[in-house]
Image (cartoon, coloured by chain):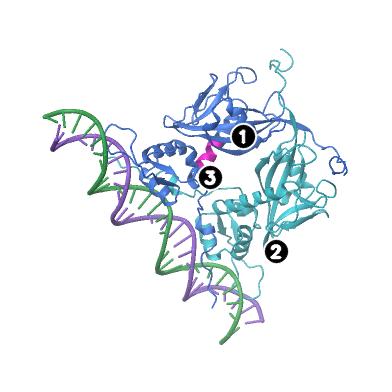
Chain colours: A blue, B cyan, C purple, D green
Amino acid sequence: MTPGPRTPPSPPWPGERFSHEALAVVLQVRHNGLHVLLWQRGAPPFEGRWALPGGPLGDDERLGASVSRHLATKVDLTDIAYLEQLETRSDPQRDPRGRVLATAYLALVSAGADPRVPPDTAWHPVGDLPLTAFDHGSIAESGRDRLRAKLSYTNIGFALAPGTFTIAQLRDIYAASVGHPVSATNLQRVLTRRGVIEPTTAAARPTALGGRPATLYRFVARVLVVTNPFAAFRPPSLFPASP
Amino acid sequence: MTPGPRTPPSPPWPGERFSHEALAVVLQVRHNGLHVLLWQRGAPPFEGRWALPGGPLGDDERLGASVSRHLATKVDLTDIAYLEQLETRSDPQRDPRGRVLATAYLALVSAGADPRVPPDTAWHPVGDLPLTAFDHGSIAESGRDRLRAKLSYTNIGFALAPGTFTIAQLRDIYAASVGHPVSATNLQRVLTRRGVIEPTTAAARPTALGGRPATLYRFVARVLVVTNPFAAFRPPSLFPASP
DNA sequence: CTCAGTTTTAGACTCTGAGGCGAAAAAGTT
DNA sequence: AACTTTTTCGCCTCAGAGTCTAAAACTGAG
């Protein structure tokens, strides 16, 4: 046997090398509003401004794993119900210290969960951000937009809602996320018809101050499923029948 | 005046540095099929296999510009009607020579254009790819899926169709892209109702062998516009009227 | 213990608009 | 005049919006 790899000597990779960081837009519905997790920088540049959690990509690490690792120090990992790559920013000027590429992820935390976060981090309403560092403000908005779009044609709500919930709770979660009122009646009908949510058998009630106890619902699947929206572009069910 | 920048001395950026390349999934409808532009590697690794066009990110270059630059050597720049970032691949093993991050872009070329390409590059049916190098096969499929999804809820067809076209031509383009037959009748009504296409006044006919001359249509806008699909999640038009 | 009040769910209707499907009409060519 | 291809029209279905009402199930007062 010839020892070592069989690959012929390959030329060194021609390009430059770049610093790279993984960032997370962590979103959660709290207090009937959509919030994003930010931490306040304690050192220049942008000292005092708020930044997305994240950090440098590890030597032998994939980007998704890197986000998870960095988030582990900010929020409990098990609280992240969904993670999806958003986009990669490459503006050479985006970091005044030098060039750093950044790949941003969208991370969702279920409502109700209240992970411990370090003292320098806090949840901010995504519609009313504080002064942000770098390009993190626009990245956060990009994450918010992605979530809003996906809410309408996927079951991504599973990552925002607790494991079991009433329609009223779900309405509040959706309303907070999309940024405008949502009809509970329509929401219930549309989501059940699509097969996205289902009532639990042991429909019970958690608490209230009088009033009919609500049925508890749950999401049928807890992985992303897109509902085929436009019949216009589905494969036709019927073809001109052969004579 | 104090000379030089005012920023206090900042610590060096902590992370490693990574090679980074920009790749393009260049799609075009040709011969009634959706094709992707690939070039055949002439050297290891993956010698003889087909790869996406692209190359190393430049020192002071943004990713989008890098794709354009690398494409310029493969196809005429002006033939790229649309460019959009797809995703960033970070598997440490994706290149056997060493770690290279790759950011892929989706690039669309209008049907009818026939850019000169170098001798080692060729168009391949995206539904029947040859042996591909690295993870380029799955990236190409990812681009195809993105295009298919966007065809249904955006006007992205403007980048696939020539400046002016008949409904029949457009039907063929859509059918080739989505991979199944499309009804010309429905396509015309849906796209005009959405305000995506419009008939040209000088509706004329190019050629045929008998038959009614077709009206020439054009896309109203040649930048991406998404049509708000789900009224379910639009802001409600009516509120419970105050008494 | 019962009854009134409250709160919320759940279901019944109707209405609208988008899209699917098929056939007739239009406008050329041979 | 026959043929061909495209356009246009009408009808049907279905998803979703919006409104209203009945029913359910709890709280608290009498």
Q: Residue at x 63, y 36 (%)?
A: A64
Real-space CA distance between mark 2 and mark 1, rounded to the nearest whole angstrom: 38 Å
- Labels 2 and 1 share a subunit: no
Q: Mark 3 points at which residue?
A: A224
Q: Is residue A25 left or right of residue B94?
A: left
Q: Do the residues labelled 1 and 3 touch (CB within 8 Å)?
A: no
Magenta span: chief secondary structure: helix
x and y percent of residue C27 in the render?
A: 57, 73
Q: Is residue B9 above or below residue A79?
A: above
Q: Mark 1 points at which residue?
A: A104
Residue A142: give x, y in percent of width and height. 57, 36
Camera-near label (2 vs 1) is 1
Q: Give, as a three-letter code, the residue at label 2.
A: His
What amino acid does circle 1 point to? Answer: Ala
| Helix, strand or loop under label 2 | loop
Q: Tag 1's secondary structure?
A: strand
Give how far across and how far down residue A209 sits, in percent.
28, 31
